[in-house]
Image (cartoon, rainbow, N blue to C red):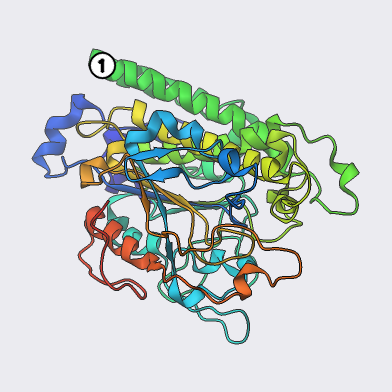
Amino acid sequence: MNLNALDRRRFLRGASGFALALPAFESFSARAGASGNSAPPRRLACFYLPNGVPMPLQEDPAFQDWSWFPHGSGRDFKFSKCLDPLEPLRDDLTVLSGLSHPASRNNHGHHNADQFLTGAPIGGGGKYRNSISLDQVYAAQVAEQTRFSSLVMSTDGGTGPERKAHTISFNGQGRPIPAENKPKRIFDMLFAKKDADAARRLALSQSVLDHLMEDASSLQKRLSKKDRATFEEFLASVRDTEINVAKSARWLDLPLPTVDVDHLNLEITAENPREYVQTMYELIYLAFKTDSTRVATYQFGKEVSKGISDYLARAVGLPLTHRLSHETKKPGGWKNFGTFCRFISEEFGRFAGRLKATPEPAGEGSMLDHTLLMLGSASSAFHLSRNYPLILAGGKSMGFQHGQYLDYAGDGAFRGVWKNGEPEPYKIRATHEDIPLSNLYVTMLQRLGVETDQFADNTGTISDV
């Protein structure tokens, strides 16, 4: 990477060969305006939750508390306990139901991560062919404006097998883009290590900031009072993230969970997986704040068990994650599954709240106003590839209208579980026609500034957002 090709004011540099990307400062805004680059960036981050969400029948006692979709509709809705951690962000998000990819509505729910952002007809077997994902369409538009075209992350890492992907990002040829799951590697992407000696020094030091403080002191003298406060907060955030990166390494190195020998993994504590998820979010935050990239994806887990992501439920004191969606008929099953989804909501809300509390470095409003977030799953009820649970947040500067629950599913959509002796929901013929999810994707791309009216099998756009 040629750092000289970028504005040198956006980096701290150390004598040992390190460089740390910095947020924008008002002290240098005149130069930015003169170069025509004063418009705030537009960012996109997509998050994937495998295995669907709790959808108890309306007559079930768990329905009121643990049904994932809100009660009510439009602006008159109430979150259940699955989503109520998002109440402080109510006016900054929209919950949607009744959308799905037409080509995948009969897929088994374990085959869905691959097509969540692509809408491709990957099927349940035979020849596999995917297409470009939503995030990569936008990444191609803004790639030349940042150091990295996109940040692709997942808890399990790599690409995974066909139809059971560990990544939700796919390139222009439909090939999976490997996801990074080690926070240390992601953190090091923020630094330029020019030679092997620099890499060795970083491995031995407690903090990369130790190598950069001389340049940091010089830069502080040139900053305004407001920028100095921003700079100090940023350095503290980097230091805290380094600490959490080190903590997460131990969690990732533990043996993979197994159903039969679960007792071997009792050393996992509630803090480990929660800190890991928080660290992954914090890395996205730093990447966005420094404008190192404007596109990120994070897949919380894969659709099946026996992976690192199967530990995530330990964050709320529950056993293996994938089991939760299979044990909803047991006593307390809906509550357990819902409690895990509540954990996902808490951390998503924490991240969105952090963006909302951070002034946009290069413009008006908050970072959340200029960042479009999507959280969702390509399953709703057990293994059912219809009526996706979706949350859209942020992006107010792009024209998004929030504070609503858009219930396109209506009364005809399948909302609950099935009775004993009946086929699983995905085997039952649909009685309700979902809206193509790609209609929402085209809307998102247009608001992000991509000139297109087509993605996958869309039939139009969605004006309600």
The picture quadrant where one finds residue 27 is: top left
Asked if 116 appears above or below 327 in the picture, the reply is below
- How far across and how far down the image is residue 203, in percent? 63, 35
Q: Nearer the viewer, residue 212 or 256?
A: 256
In this rendering, would 91 be left or right of 389? left
Badge count = 1
Instruction: Determine whether the residue tagged by mark 1 lies in a helix, strand or loop.
Output: helix
Residue 182, image x and y in percent? 62, 46
Could you tell me which residue is drawn at 56 percent across and 82 percent down? 128
Q: Where residue 323 sits in the image (x, y, percent)?
A: 75, 52
Q: Residues within 10 Å of mark 1 (few under 14, many from 20)?
A: few
Above or below, comparing residue 458 to residue 158 in the picture: below
Residue 16 visible here: no
* Residue 183 image point, x, y percent: 58, 42
Q: Residue furthest left?
A: 34
Which residue carries the number 1 mark? 226
Asked if residue 72 lies left or right of residue 153, the reply is left
Q: Nearer the viewer, residue 220 or 253?
A: 253
Residue 154 left/right relative to 328:
left
List the single residue furthest toward the front: 59
Residue at the image position 45 percent from the left and 26 percent from the top: 212
Instruction: Write the residue at 83% across / 53% down.
Output: 258
